[in-house]
Image (cartoon, rainbow, N blue to C red):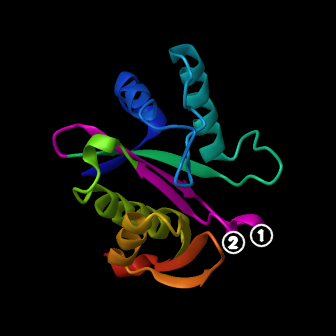
Amino acid sequence: MQLIEAWMGDLGKTYELFQQFPADENGFENDAAGLNRDEFDAYLRELKNTAAGINLPEGYVPATKYILVDDDGAYVGIFNLRHRLNDFLRKGPGHIGYGIAPAYRGKGYATAGLKLTLEKAHNEFGIDEAYLSVHKTNVASLKVQQHCGARIDHEDNTHYYTRIATTSTH
C-alpha cells in the first residue's frame, strides 16, 4: 500500500478515481467532480501548485492530494493533507480529509491510508498532532480515525472534531 501525489500517478486511473466521488460526500469535497479530461489535467497542475504553496487563494494553506494505491496497483482512495493550519482549519476541517472509492469501502483501506497520511504529516511536515473532523452521521469514518488513535476533542451539532498524535501510528 502506498500514497502517491495525485499528479504523479497514472493520469487515466487518477481521473477515473476522482470521477467516482460527488462534489461533496459526507464532508469529503471533490473539486474535480464532473470535470472533463482536459479540465482535470489543469486541475492536477493546480494541485501541484497548491502543494508547493504557489498561487494560493486567500485563506488557503499548502496541501498535497495523494492517491492511495493498493498492492495490486488499484487506485482506491484520495487523501488530502494540509501542511499547516490556519484559524479556520484549526476550528473546522483540520489537516486531513479522505475518501475511499465505493468498491473498496469497508475493507480497511481508509485506516491504512490514514496511517500512511499521518506518517507523512509527521515525517515530511513536522505535524505532531493532526486535527480532523467527521460528520456525526459518518460512523465508519469516526471508527477509522479512532483505529488510528483519534480522540474526540470537541463537537458541535453536526461534527466531531478529533485529534490524533502522528507518532502513535508508527
Residue type at numbered disc 1: Asp
The residue pinned by badge 2 equals 90
The label shown at residue 105 is none
Residue lying at 66% horizontally and 77% vertically, measured from the top left: 156
Q: Which of the two residues, 126 or 73, is positioned nearer the viewer here?
A: 73
The single residue placed furthest to the right in the displayed view is: 58
Q: Position of residue 6 (x, y in %)?
A: 46, 38
Q: Tell me which corner region of the image, top left, top right, bottom left or bottom right, holds residue 24.
A: top right
Q: Residue furthest left?
A: 72
Residue count near mark 1 (Cα–Cα under 10 Å), binned few <14, some 14–19, many ≥20: few
Residue 94 in view here: yes
Residues at discs 1 and 2 in contact (Cβ within 8 Å): yes
Q: Residue at left 72%, top 41%? A: 54
Q: Is residue 76 magenta?
A: yes
Pick the residue in front: 56 or 99.
Answer: 99
Circle 2 Cα neighbour tier, 10 Å, few/some/many (<14 / 14–19 / ≥20):
some
What residue would you read off at disc 1? 87
Residue 128 in view of the camera: no
Q: Quadrant of the C terminus?
A: bottom left
Q: Is residue 103 left or right of residue 160?
A: left
Q: In terms of secondary structure, where does tag 1 sit?
A: helix
Residue 90 position, x and y percent, is 69, 71
Establish if 62 lies above or below 162: above
* Circle 2: element type: helix
> Which residue does the image show at 56% across and 32% down from the upper left?
32
Report the span colored magenta: 71-99
Residue drawn at 35 percent across, 42 percent down: 101
Q: Amino acid at mark 2?
A: Arg
Could you say where residue 38 lies in the image, as x and y percent from the top left? 56, 14
Check the image and report above or below for 37 versus 15: above
Nearest to the observer: residue 151 or residue 10: 151
